[in-house]
Amino acid sequence: MNNLGYCCINLTLQKKNKITTNRTMRQATFLDRGISYCSELALLNCKDLYKILEWNSQNNVNLFRISSNLFPWNSEYALEDLPDFLEISNILKSCGHLATQSKQRLIFHPDHFVKLASESDKTKKNSIHDLEVHSKIFDLMGFVPSFHNPINIHVGCKLTKDSIQRFLNSVELLSENVMKRLVIENDDKAAMFSVKDLYENIHKQTGIPITFDYHHHKFHDSSLTEEAAFHLANSTWVTHKPVFHYSSSRLIETPGVNPRAHADYIHENISTYNSDIDIELEAKAKELALLQYWRNKQHV
């Protein structure tokens, strides 16, 4: 069965009960209030994550991307150093139990600052730390490291021999737990990595599965049809069901905007080419877009 899910924010709960997992702060506030305030916000974020997972369970949503803002400024401390770590870890364990019992597949997609192929040693070091934090959160949830709970990233640089080698070198520095969860996604710009580029230059060397982004493929296809790219990416998920991304172009809703921008809702029927996959909807309307897509499918 193909499961559909959404990303990070539940607009229904946010509007009704101010539930969010994106509490953070400016750098000036962090410098002034430090790790104790980070801990307070992280605790609130984790409590609200549980509420979102409850809503998902009640509404038959079996796929959800957790916000990477769960722990503000997590590059500056170890999670275990948070004053509220014990309570936070207990809540995350409960989140993991709820997800398992309700058959929710949870995933991460760290932000664009994660660049394992960067020329900057500092950026690479910070990127590795960020990936380890994401993996630690899954560990605290009680999840066995696997591609069932993937951590999805982009290579983060233009396609060159040097960038490929830098990425491969950085991957060797990651923990076993991260590597058992790490997946890579195709880009939407011609100078960067298509599905074919990822397959030839990253997957073949590392075995890292490829997340197929339908929308990105429209702008960088490397002469592969959508179906061919879909199946190529699908073939890299040997042990677990793939998680792919889908979004419509915002151009459909707002004429004249950048066609790469994501629409609020999904405006096409999603073809899965007779394959069993999970699909994360990267629509701006979040769970509202998912619910509308389901309603539209029922009337087809």
Image (cartoon, rainbow, N blue to C red):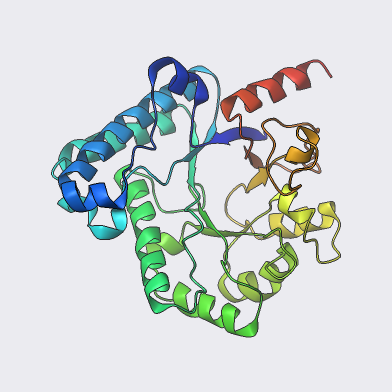
| 59 w.r.t. 243: above or below | above
Q: Position of residue 18 (x, y in %)?
A: 38, 22
Residue at the outermost left position: 83
Q: Residue at x 49, y 44 (%)?
A: 107
The answer to whether one can see residue 82 in this image is no
Q: Quadrant of the C terminus?
A: top right
Q: Residue at x 42, y 47 (%)?
A: 68
Q: Position of residue 166 (x, y in %)?
A: 52, 80
Q: Residue at x 23, y 44 (%)?
A: 38
Q: Position of residue 59 (x, y in %)?
A: 54, 18
Q: Quadrant of the N terminus?
A: top right
Would you say 146 lies left or right of 208 here? left
Would you say 176 lies left or right of 237 here? left
Residue 202 picture quarter? bottom right
| 105 w.r.t. 124: above or below | above
Q: Residue at x 45, y 75 (%)?
A: 170
Q: Position of residue 280 (x, y in %)?
A: 61, 40
Residue 256 picture quarter? top right
